[in-house]
Every structure is written in C-alpha cells, then in structure tokens.
Amino acid sequence: QVQLVESGGGLVQAGGSLRLSCAASGRTFSRYTMGWFRQAPGKEREFIAAISWNDGTTYYSVSMRGRSTISRDNAKNTVYLQMNNLKPEDTALYYCAADMRLAMLRSGYPDYWGQGTQVTVSS
C-alpha cells in the first residue's frame, strides 16, 4: 500500500509560482513512477507530468511543458511539481499519483491517488 499526501497549493496571482509536494508512505517508493494530475470544475482529470522510478525520465503534458518541473527525492519519499508563470486556467485541484507501470499512470489509471491540493490562480 502507498499513501500519498499533497501539500503546497494555495492562492497565487497570475504569473506567480508554486511548488507542490507529495509525501508518500511505504518502503518501496523508489520503485514507483510518480505523477501529477489536475482537475478543474466541470472538466476531466488531466495528466500534467510524470517521473520514472528507475532513471528519472520525465514526461509532461503540452499544457504545462516549459512551465513546470517534476522531480523526486527518494530519500524523503517525496515528489515535487514546480509550476511557474501560472495562469488563471491552471486553477484546479492537483493530485499526486503512483504506479509501478508508467503506461497505467500516464493513461490516468494509477494504483494510488492522493486527496489533492487546491491551486487557485487569480487574474
């Protein structure tokens, strides 16, 4: 079992930055591909970024590429999402996810989800 707890969300002005954190429980964190998703009201959950467990390869959605950076610290069982130049359309509930299979995570069907952290970007 893996439990995921997100933090770092909040209210920020357009153009600002936030760093989200996701703390994971479990001794096998380093074997999980980790990812971030978001869901805005009335919209489907959207993949943002993922980082592989073995070589740290990163993957980004078109919407956040160039404005976000995903990273992980296996010693701290934590994955981060640094977001810059935020826009009002980035307002959403941001979720952390984990799966040993990259394909399952990127397709939106990971084994584990966090509860989410709210990001609100004002114009």
Image (cartoon, rainbow, N blue to C red):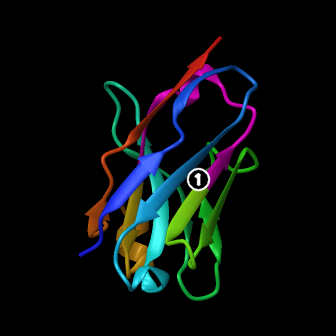
Vertical side of 61 occupied by 116: above or below = above
Q: How many marks?
A: 1
Outermost left residue: 1
Q: Amino acid at mark 1?
A: Ser
Q: Is residue 109 visible?
A: no
**Can residue 92 be seen from the camera position used here?**
yes
Q: Is residue 85 magenta?
A: yes
For label 1, the residue is: 61
Q: Identify the residue at image location x=47%, y=75%.
A: 33
Give the quadrant of the C terminus.
top right
The residue lying at 51 percent from left, 35 percent from top is 9
Q: Which residue is the extreme one toward the top?
A: 123
**Helix, strand or loop under label 1:** loop
Whether 36 is among the magenta residues is no
Image coords of residue 58 (percent x, y): 64, 70
For residue 48, side relative to residue 64 (left or right): left
Residue 50 drawn at (x, y percent): 54, 65
With respect to residue 4, does 66 lie above or below? above
Which quadrant is home to the N terminus? Answer: bottom left
The magenta stretch is 81-95
Q: Residue furthest front?
A: 76
Q: Residue at x 67, y 49 (%)?
A: 82
The quarter holding residue 41 reads top left
Please report the residue visible at 56 percent of the width from the left and 30 percent of the height from the top. 90
